[in-house]
Amino acid sequence: MKIVAIEESFNNSVCVCYPDSSLLRNNDDFYIPNFSSHIQATIGVYISIHKIGKHIDTQFIHRYYKSYGLAINFVATDVIQQLHNKHLSTDMARGFDHSFAVSTHVFSKDSHPFEKAHFECTYNTMHFESKGAQIIDKIHAICAECSQYYTLKIGDIVFLPLWNIPGKINIGDLFNASINTQYVLHCSVK
């Protein structure tokens, strides 16, 4: 399985792939790696692919996933800058081990339609929220775009970033996220 996401790079959107080793599960703590002094976080929603597909048209994306959840993507921005300066790939700054925390519980779109979902997250004292109806077209478009480059396979995750945490994260920071008022993700920074 892989994690596929759309990220902004120099004002352009690019598809980025993370390995399964980047997954952080079960509300485990995120440990700031010793190779970075500036980790930033993005919180978003993801869909879990349940049917193999490539070159999928946006109108058919709903046939390729059955569940969704929330995730936190941790990125070593100082390492990205170093790699950019050397004109090297930034994969290791984005997809390092345990850099992608996923919710412990996913919601079935059959019993909890995505467009009716309410997503919330707190980061320390900051609060973010979004409604599924506001972002369903965007996540379908991202999924369709990524499927032009990567074959989407059963178990893959397609991630839509929603909220960028300003500045770097620090030891002691705390993330809590919920879908329809049910807590699905808790992550402490160590």
Image (spheres, grey):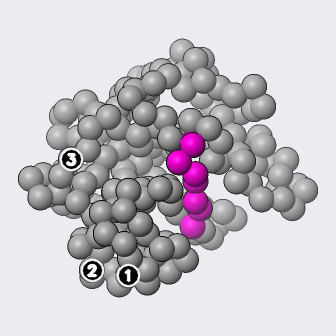
x and y, in percent, of residue 152 in the image: 43, 69
Question: Residue placed farthest to the right in the image?
Answer: 86
In the rendered structure, does residue 19 fall within the stretch colored magenta? yes
Is tag 1's residue or tag 3's residue first in the polypeptide sequence?
Answer: 1
**Residue under circle 1?**
56
From what the image shows, is residue 130 above or below residue 59?
above
Using residue 142 as the reference point, say whether residue 62 is left or right of it: left
Please report the residue visible at 63 percent of the width from the left and 47 percent of the height from the top.
95
Residues at marks 1 and 2 touching, judged by CB atoms closer than 8 Å: yes
Name which residue lies at 9% across and 53% down: 111
Task: Please tell me the numbered disc located at residue 60.
Answer: 2
Per the image, label 3 sits on a secondary structure element best described as strand
Label 1 crowd bin: few (<14), some (14–19), many (20+), radius 10 Å: many
- Residue under numbered circle 3: 107
Q: Residue furthest left?
A: 111
Rounded to the nearest whole Å, what is the CA distance between mark 3 and mark 2? 20 Å
Q: In this view of the protein, which residue sits in the foreground, 154 or 57? A: 154
In space, the residues marked 1 and 3 are separated at their CA atoms by 23 Å
Picture disc at residue 76: none
C-alpha distance separating marks 1 and 2: 7 Å
Q: Which residues are magenta?
A: 15-22
Q: Is residue 145 above or below residue 176?
A: below
Q: Amino acid at mark 1?
A: Ile
> Mark 1: which secondary structure?
loop
Name the residue at 41% across, 48% down.
Answer: 44
- Contact flag, marks 3 and 2 (Cβ < 8 Å): no
* Principal secondary structure, stretch drawn in magenta: strand
User: In the image, what residue type sits under mark 3?
Assistant: Phe
Residue 83: percent from the left, percent from the top? 83, 52
Estimate the x, y position of residue 24 in percent, counting from the top left. 49, 35
CA neighbours of label 3 inside 10 A, class few (<14), some (14 to 19), many (20+): many
Q: Amino acid at mark 2?
A: Phe
